[in-house]
Image (cartoon, coloured by chain):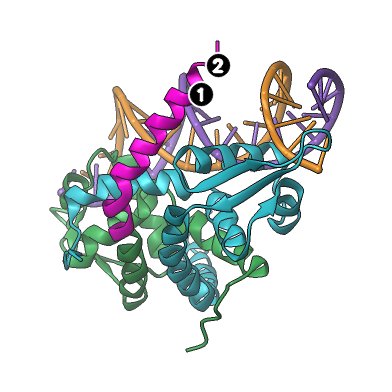
Chain colours: A cyan, B green, C orange, D purple
Amino acid sequence: MNMPTSPDTRSCSKVSEVFSRVGDKWSMQVVVVLQSQPQRFNDLRRQVNGVSQQMLTRTLRFLERDGLVERTVLGTSPPQVSYALTPLGRSLAEPVRALAAWALGNLETLQDNRRHYDAAHEEGAK
Amino acid sequence: MNMPTSPDTRSCSKVSEVFSRVGDKWSMQVVVVLQSQPQRFNDLRRQVNGVSQQMLTRTLRFLERDGLVERTVLGTSPPQVSYALTPLGRSLAEPVRALAAWALGNLETLQDNRRHYDAAHEEGAK
DNA sequence: CGGGATCCAGTAGGATACTG
DNA sequence: CAGTATCCTACTGGATCCCG
């Protein structure tokens, strides 16, 4: 595969576009949750902590629109809808998990740095 | 290293926190640009396409606060400030680049899917 | 159960002008 | 050159009600 050593400035706008899509508050969480298995709407809602059904609906629509998840209507009288990752969605899950791993490993350091920074900059501020 | 096979739901909130920090419109672009070499303010501004000096300032502040970039004031009469990635920032650049690679490789597919979706859903819409 | 419609608050982000 | 301050808009995200 042709992965350049340094995806430089000109690539950044494209990266930014993708981040704008999947980098919102819920998308990657949904992707990670769906990665284990297909889920129904309220199952998802329970597993993605704190999401409103509004935002879950929106997020799923966006992901569906980009071909990252697939929506399957099962029944009709008790409306059952199943959401699953497409192959594309699964391929996205990999780098997302890499970033997730970084996040988990460095979250404390970040918070620590932040506290240190705030303390250092509050002595001079009003 | 202990990277679980599936960073499951409980980890997602933490991931979300980090994403909230670096997943904004400019942070990772700045990180990627700085990754090649330290840069001055207006150099950065030129390389990060479309950023206002307002947002660049904010972004750099946040990154500095989290210990991801280091700010160095050089002169005083012609104010020169250099920004460089910290080791932590460089470690973040890796997974970001992985995601960037995915973005570059799948951007067209995403846009294509989106067009297809929009076309399919406009026939029934108003 | 799944999700559309509406309303509303908070914030991200842009433009401009000013400062040291 | 490297910001700060102010203002303003658009979008994000939440709550609530309603519908099939």
B108 magenta-colored: yes
Q: Nearer the viewer, residue B90 or B94?
A: B94
State the residue at coordinates (54%, 50%): A27
- Residue tagged 2: B124
Q: Nearer the viewer, residue A62 or B88?
A: A62
B70 magenta-colored: no
Residue at mark 2: chain: B
Q: Is residue B116 left or right of residue A4?
A: right
**Residue lying farthest top?**
B126
The secondary structure making up most of the magenta span is helix
* CB atoms of marks 2 and 1 within 8 Å: yes
Instruction: Look at the numbered disc 2 and give the secondary structure of its residue.
Output: loop
Q: Is residue B112 left or right of residue A39?
A: left
Q: Is residue A90 left or right of residue A16?
A: right
Quadrant assignment for the C terminus of chain B = top right
Q: How many marks can you see?
A: 2
- Residue tagged 1: B121
Q: Is residue A34 left or right of residue B23?
A: right
Q: Is residue B117 visible to us here?
A: yes
Amino acid at circle 2: Gly
> Relative to B114, is A56 above or below?
below
Magenta residues (range): B100-126
Q: Are marks 2 and 1 on the same chain?
A: yes
Quarter of the rendering containing residue A47: bottom right
**Residue lying farthest bottom?**
B1
Residue at mark 1: chain: B
Instruction: Look at the numbered disc 1 and give the secondary structure of its residue.
Output: helix
Q: Is residue B56 visible to us here?
A: no
**Mark 1 crowd level (few <14, some 14–19, many ≥20, 10 Å Cα):** few
Q: Position of residue C18 (x, y in %)?
A: 30, 30
Quarter of the rendering containing residue A96: bottom left
